[in-house]
Amino acid sequence: QVQLVESGGGLVQPGGSLRLSCAASGSISSINAMGWYRQAPGQQRELVAAIVSGGSTKYVDSVKGRFTISRDNAKNTIYLQMNSLKPEDTAVYYCNAGRKLGTDSIWYYQRLNIWGQGTQVTVSS
């Protein structure tokens, strides 16, 4: 079983930055991909960014150039660095464990039902 614990959310002004962290523990050897999702009130949960074991990353268009997903294998931790934050980035952010489908050059993220507890990010002046 895999456990995910998130940290790093909070209130920030538009244009500001936050960094989210997600520490994984348990049977993590079966996990070859991880992602960050977000869910705003009244909206569906969406995949924001994903990273696979080879280091390749994907982002939803709305955050490209502003968010960066990274990992520290020694700490079994992934991060989401969020810069130039906008009010529309306000949501609960969730860490997810998943699988990479496809090849190293063309891959897709398949989420598993393994979630962190969620952390609130609010962008407001």
Image: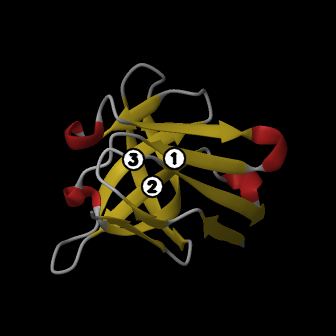
Of marks 2 and 3, which one's residue comes earlier in the chain? Answer: 3
* Disc 1 crowd, CA 10 A, few/some/many (<14, 14-19, 20+): many
SS category of the residue bearing label 3: loop
Q: Are marks 2 and 3 in contact (CB under 8 Å)?
A: no
Q: Residue at x 69, y 71 (%)?
A: 3
Q: Are marks 1 and 3 in contact (CB under 8 Å)?
A: no
Is residue 35 depicted above or below 25 in this figure?
Answer: above
Of marks 1 and 3, which one's residue comes earlier in the chain? Answer: 3
Q: Residue at x 20, y 58 (%)?
A: 88
Amino acid under disc 2: Trp
Farthest front residue in view: 125
Q: Are marks 1 and 2 in contact (CB under 8 Å)?
A: yes
- Residue at the spot of label 3: 16
Q: Position of residue 26 (x, y in %)?
A: 79, 67
The quarter in which the N terminus is drawn is: bottom right
- Residue at the spot of label 1: 80
SS category of the residue bearing label 2: strand
Amino acid under disc 3: Gly
Tell me which corner region of the image, top left, top right, bottom left or bottom right, holds residue 57: top left
- Residue at the spot of label 2: 36
